[in-house]
């Protein structure tokens, strides 16, 4: 039974009844339970630290979350009998454990995650989450996230909330009543921050190529990584841009302040930035606070391709680790290693393609080369994807690929022409090898 509504009871009494310490609250977790964390900045670090400290009380507790900026200590080898990581997205704190065989990943489109929870495809015993103190009506605010957390709170059998006065009040599907919570723990702490990535010459050039495809009055989705900020910084001369995106980072703020992003031309939610979660610095979280321009909505709404398609001139901008000659995009694995997750990449690629005005486009933008940890420089455009890698955006969905060497459109091109277009935007140091591979693969001259 979902926990949905508020209660006429005096919520202050309820709050006092539910108030406890982190040490006591995590005793509600039992061996073999499935635990889901609030997503991203909504992850309650104080509760997670208490859970890890209480590890001796648990055997085989399954931990699931999507993007996390946390330490991921529950994946450490010494806790392998206590916790198992069933991730939806790998990150800095969890990648190593996956590579070493502890834990696994569950492939799921971000847009479908709340639907899976409602249908019982994924069930959670406990949800650990962070939210603001209650308002005068007894509603706490999720402030930085609605994505899957809004549904996880409704679906989990037990909900434990870290109450943190630094969580902003955001409008949208962010209101959680005290009656929906089983235990509350007051613990103030600064919110986790993700600083903007530096924009070098390569990113700047990529940003400029992306900007050349973006018309005034477009609605943008910006993915995760260094490229989105570079694109935004190239849009200062544009007019009346809007945002309908899974996430935003600090990069949008300069354009909002400059009046470039005003959402005035949006055909869905005119005047409002629509997102599922925020991942930036305090500057972004302050912007969210009581700001009617920003609306946080669950991901099964925001990332639904049919909803995305209601935005005229919808432009989706995401990044990739590798693109092969057919335009297959690998964005979340490096060979057999899980690097991140699908997130909303495919949701937005498909939604933009179906934009009702016929003017939607999707862009996959990435530097042409990368340097591996051992110092080897490799081309991100390759004849074949790495052995064991998984395709994120497939060759039927992919549209524009951009590197610092130009723009290659995949749609409408046969395979050989796709490969030719991709070689034309590859790094000069990789071209000889790619041309040779072209001749071998297609048994024809370039
Ligand atoms: N082979 C081996 N290693 C590679 C590689 C390749 N082809 N391409 C990149 N790498 C390495 C880089 O060297 C870098 O290593 P480092 O961490 O040691 O520096 C690392 O992988 C990350 O690459 P980078 O280009 O810096 O990634 P990013 O931070 O810009 O993020 C994605 C790019 C693709 C990983 C990221 O956008 C993602 O996870 N996408 C999937 C989800 C998504 O698109 N969501 C969109 C909606 S929010």
Image: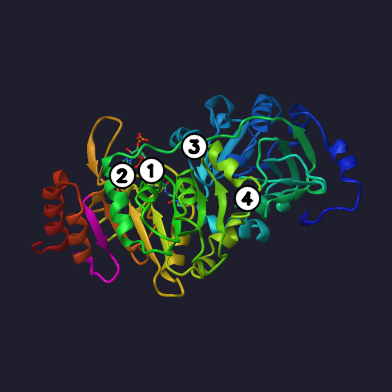
Q: Earlier in the sequence, mark 1 or mark 3?
A: 3
Q: Tell me if the residue at label 2 has its CB under 8 Å from ligand 1.
A: no
* Badge 1 residue CB within 8 Å of ligand 1: yes
Q: Can residue 410 be found in the magenta stretch? A: yes
Q: Is mark 4 within 8 Å of ligand 1?
A: no
On residue 359, which mark appears?
none
> How many C-alpha atoms fall within 10 Å of the one at disc 4: few (<14), some, or many (≥20)?
some
Label 3 close to label 4 by CB (< 8 Å):
no
Q: What element carries label 4?
A: loop
Q: Name the residue furthest bottom.
A: 357
Quadrant where ligand 1 appears: top left
SS for callout 1: loop
**52 sits to left or right of 380:** right
Q: Residue 203 carries which label?
A: 2
Q: Which of 8 and 89 is in front in this view?
A: 8
* Label 2, residues with CA under 10 Å away: few <14, some 14-19, many ≥20: many
Mark 1 lies on residue: 226
Residue bounds of the magenta highlight? 405-416
Residue 279 belongs to magenta span: no
Q: Residues within 10 Å of mark 1 (few under 14, many from 20)?
A: some
**Residue placed farthest to the front in the image?**
258
Residue at x 70% of width, y 46% of height: 141
Mark 1 and 2 residues: CB-CB less than 8 Å, in contact? Answer: yes
Residue drawn 19% across and 65% down? 416
Q: Mark 3 to mark 4: distance in Å?
A: 21 Å
- Mark 1 and mark 2: Cα distance apart in space: 8 Å
Q: Which of marks 1 and 2 is nearer the N terminus?
A: 2
**Numbered tag placed on residue 194 in the rendering:** 3
Give the alpha-carbon distance from disc 2 to disc 3, as whole Å. 18 Å
Q: Mark 4 points at which residue?
A: 291
Residue 201 visible in image: yes
């Amino acid at each position: 039974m979902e926990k949905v509504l508020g209660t006429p009871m005096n919520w202050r009494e309820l709050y006092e009844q539910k108030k406890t310490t982190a040490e006591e609250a995590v005793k509600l977790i039992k061996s073999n339970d499935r635990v889901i964390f609030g997503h991203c900045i909504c992850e309650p670090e104080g509760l997670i630290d208490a859970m890890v400290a209480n590890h001796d009380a648990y055997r085989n507790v399954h931990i699931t979350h999507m993007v996390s900026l946390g330490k991921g200590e529950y994946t450490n080898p010494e806790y392998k009998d206590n916790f198992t990581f069933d991730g939806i997205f790998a990150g800095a704190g969890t990648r190593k454990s996956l590579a070493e065989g502890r834990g696994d990943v569950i492939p799921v489109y971000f847009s479908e995650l709340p639907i899976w929870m409602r249908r019982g495809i994924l069930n959670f015993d406990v949800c650990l989450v962070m939210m603001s103190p209650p308002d005068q009506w007894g509603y706490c605010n999720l402030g930085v996230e609605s994505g899957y957390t809004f549904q996880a709170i409704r679906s989990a059998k037990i909900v434990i909330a870290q109450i943190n006065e630094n969580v902003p009040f955001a409008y949208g599907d962010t209101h959680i009543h005290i009656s929906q919570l089983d235990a509350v723990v007051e613990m103030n702490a600064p919110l986790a921050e993700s600083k903007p990535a530096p924009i070098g010459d390569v990113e700047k050039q990529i940003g400029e190529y992306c900007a050349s495809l973006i018309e005034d009055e477009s609605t943008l989705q910006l993915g995760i990584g260094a490229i989105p900020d570079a694109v935004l910084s190239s849009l200062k001369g544009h007019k009346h841009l809007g945002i309908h995106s899974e996430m935003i980072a600090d990069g949008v703020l300069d354009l909002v302040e400059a009046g470039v992003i005003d959402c005035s031309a949006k055909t869905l939610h005119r005047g409002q930035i629509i997102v599922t979660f925020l991942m930036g610095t305090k500057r972004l979280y302050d912007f969210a606070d009581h700001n009617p321009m920003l609306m946080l909505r669950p991901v099964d709404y925001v990332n639904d391709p049919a909803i995305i398609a209601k935005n005229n001139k919808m432009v989706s901008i995401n990044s990739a680790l590798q693109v092969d000659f057919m335009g297959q995009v690998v964005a979340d694995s490096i060979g057999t290693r899980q690097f991140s997750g699908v997130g909303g990449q495919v949701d937005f690629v498909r939604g933009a393609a179906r934009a009702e005005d016929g003017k939607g486009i999707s862009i996959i933008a990435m530097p042409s080369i990368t340097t591996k940890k051992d110092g080897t420089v490799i081309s991100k455009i390759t004849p074949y994807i790495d052995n064991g890698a998984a395709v994120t955006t497939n060759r039927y969905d992919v549209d524009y690929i951009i590197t610092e060497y130009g723009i290659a459109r995949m749609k409408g091109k046969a395979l050989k022409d796709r490969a030719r277009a991709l070689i034309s935007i590859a790094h000069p140091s990789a071209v000889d090898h790619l041309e040779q591979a072209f001749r071998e693969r297609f048994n024809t001259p370039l």
